[in-house]
Image (tube, helix red, strand yellow):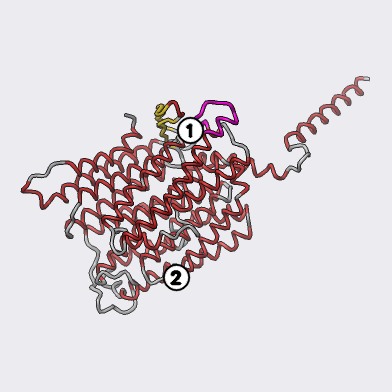
């Protein structure tokens, strides 16, 4: 089995082992420890494999470490995997966040009663395999299969292990995502069938083959809308975010860390991997619509974030705003904007995961409440925790020198070159981010100590969870070029069709194309030169 298949399926295998490995009767009270150790080992090995793949990837090499095996030959579906600049950093982000979340789960279940821990770890590791498969898939049908697979374990993790009104939260998540998934399935089937019919070729779902078989503009437009709905629900973006408040409140802390940090990126990644290369004319046609949706998401998410008192919802609505910036960069259809969006995906994952974990730590010190009005006053008694939280908060508001600064700068630069008015309005989102991020930090760490707050410093186990996330955050803050250099060639290739389509509307119907005009001018110059030569000879 090739290395990328090891990377995808190893977490699921370890999750299965954690669920079925027999535990002696004398160790039944420690079965959650054994199951957690197996899951943690699998997640750490997956992280090591991801680092090996990323280090081995050469910038500009195109798709590498390719696995291409016929899966369902009659339907033209291939088990095709590959790494390039679009997904290299994202698989690193995925394995890092899942490893830290499994580590956090291990520490929590050692101190809390943990019924059905085996099932929890199995579902958690299956989710990691599905997310990695979605990022590495190079076949449209395979991408859809992994996209749908990763939802199943999260439904069960929320429904079984969630808190509060978890049934309502799970139901809303199922309704929203099921509609999006069905639309995406219909769009994927239509893409393969229509490409085959319009070009007279055998049906195929390989992304490289579909890119060489462009659909008509009319077909591209309705298929684009189907994919857009599915991806915007996943991110989430306004107005398809209705599942988010209930879902985020009900999820266990470790689940919401990876859900907001990784799963939301699958939607944004889908735009770069599938939508722009396969439907470039539709991307140009709906560019303004997508930019407006992104802009509204930025403003709406920011405004609601600094009116909330639930710390978890502040982080949730801020994610809507940050993902609005990412969408803005993608649909600027400029290299700088799209590269900034890809960097922003990684940065947001590294910021939002520690924020949710820190909120859980603060809630544990505030009697279990996540209301910022019942927190505060522990900054001087827990300086390490306060410092880490400050670093993450400053990264959230894209302070110069932080990891988010380079990403948002490139996004706004790309949008400014494409749609200046939208870029100018989007600057307000940067200002509002400083309001909700600093408000969250100040209200939870400063002010008077609430009577219910127990001031204590960060524990060793909690520090082990946060340390790798903050280290990766600081690395990208000091050296964002490492990620940008690896992604440049792949992002440019993803945008090539859309940028070419941008030029086409500028040519008036019936007028010669730019290429034809250039050829005509060259022919006229050659004719004039030949005539001068004849006259000189005479």
Does 300 appear above or below 120? below
- Is 198 magenta? The answer is yes
- Residue 91 sits in quarter: top left
Q: Position of residue 315 (x, y in %)?
A: 39, 63
**Label 2: few (<14), some or many (≥20) within 10 Å?**
many
> Is 354 situated left or right of 521 in this image?
left
Q: Is residue 521 magenta?
A: no
Q: Bounds of the magenta span?
A: 193-209
User: Secondary structure under badge 1?
Assistant: loop
Q: Can you identify the residue that label 1 sits on?
A: 205
Q: Residue 293: image x %, image y %?
A: 55, 57
Task: State left or right for residue 147 relative to residue 367.
Answer: right
Q: Nearer the viewer, residue 31 or 86?
A: 31
Q: Which mark is residue 306?
A: 2
Q: Report if residue 474 is visible in the image.
A: no
Q: Nearer the viewer, residue 355 or 19?
A: 19
Q: Position of residue 17 (x, y in %)?
A: 20, 40
User: In which quadrant of the rendered image does the C terminus lie?
Assistant: top right
Q: Earlier in the sequence, mark 2 or mark 1?
A: 1
Query: Tag 1: Cα neighbours inside 10 Å, few (<14), some, or many (≥20)?
Result: many
Residue 156 rendering spot, x and y as whole percentages: 30, 51
Tag nearer the camera, 2 or 1:
1
């Amino acid at each position: 089995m090739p290395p990328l298949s090891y990377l995808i399926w190893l977490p699921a295998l370890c999750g299965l082992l954690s669920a079925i490995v027999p535990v002696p009767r004398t160790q039944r009270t420690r079965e959650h420890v054994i199951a957690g150790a197996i899951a943690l080992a699998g997640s750490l090995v997956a992280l090591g494999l991801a680092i090996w793949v990323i280090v081995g990837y050469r910038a500009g090499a195109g798709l590498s470490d390719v696995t291409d095996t016929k899966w369902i030959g009659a339907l033209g579906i291939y088990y095709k995997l590959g790494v390039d600049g679009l997904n290299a950093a994202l698989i690193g982000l995925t394995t890092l966040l899942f490893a830290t979340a499994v580590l956090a789960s291990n520490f929590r279940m050692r101190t809390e009663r943990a019924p059905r821990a085996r099932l929890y770890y199995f579902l958690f590791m299956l989710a990691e395999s599905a997310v990695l498969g979605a990022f590495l898939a190079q076949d449209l049908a395979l991408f859809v299969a992994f996209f749908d697979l990763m939802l199943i374990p999260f439904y069960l993790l929320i429904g079984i292990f969630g808190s509060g009104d978890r049934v309502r939260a799970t139901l809303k998540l199922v309704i929203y995502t099921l509609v999006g998934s069905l639309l995406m399935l219909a769009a994927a089937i239509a893409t393969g069938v229509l490409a085959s019919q319009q070009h007279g070729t055998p049906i195929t779902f390989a992304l490289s083959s579909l890119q060489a078989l462009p659909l008509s503009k009319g077909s591209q437009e309705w298929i684009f809308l189907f994919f857009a709905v599915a991806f915007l629900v996943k991110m989430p973006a306004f107005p398809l975010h209705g599942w988010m408040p209930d879902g985020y409140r009900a999820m266990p802390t470790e689940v919401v860390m990876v859900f907001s940090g990784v799963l939301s990126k699958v939607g944004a990644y889908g735009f770069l991997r599938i939508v722009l290369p396969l439907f470039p004319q539709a991307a140009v046609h709906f560019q303004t619509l997508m930019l407006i949706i992104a802009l509204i998401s930025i403003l709406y998410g920011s405004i609601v974030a600094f009116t909330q008192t639930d710390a978890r919802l502040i982080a949730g609505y801020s994610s809507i705003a940050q993902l609005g910036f990412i969408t803005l960069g993608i649909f600027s259809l400029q290299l700088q904007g799209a590269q900034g969006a890809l960097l922003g995906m990684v940065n947001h994952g590294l910021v939002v995961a520690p924020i949710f974990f820190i909120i859980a730590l603060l809630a544990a010190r505030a009697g279990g409440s996540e209301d910022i009005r019942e927190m505060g006053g522990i900054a001087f008694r827990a300086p390490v925790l306060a410092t880490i939280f400050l670093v993450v908060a400053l990264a959230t508001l894209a302070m110069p020198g932080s990891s988010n600064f380079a990403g948002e700068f490139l996004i706004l630069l790309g949008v400014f070159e494409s749609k200046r008015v939208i870029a100018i309005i989007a600057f307000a989102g940067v200002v509002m981010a400083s309001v909700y991020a600093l408000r969250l930090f100040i209200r939870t760490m400063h002010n008077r100590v609430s009577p219910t707050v127990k001031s204590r410093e960060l524990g060793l186990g909690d520090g082990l969870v946060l340390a790798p996330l903050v280290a990766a955050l600081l690395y990208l803050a000091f050296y964002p070029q490492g990620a940008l250099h690896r992604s440049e060639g792949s992002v440019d290739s993803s945008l090539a069709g859309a940028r070419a389509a941008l030029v086409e509307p500028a040519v008036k119907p019936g007028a010669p194309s730019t290429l034809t005009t250039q050829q005509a001018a060259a022919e006229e110059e050659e004719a004039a030169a030949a005539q001068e030569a004849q006259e000189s000879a005479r």
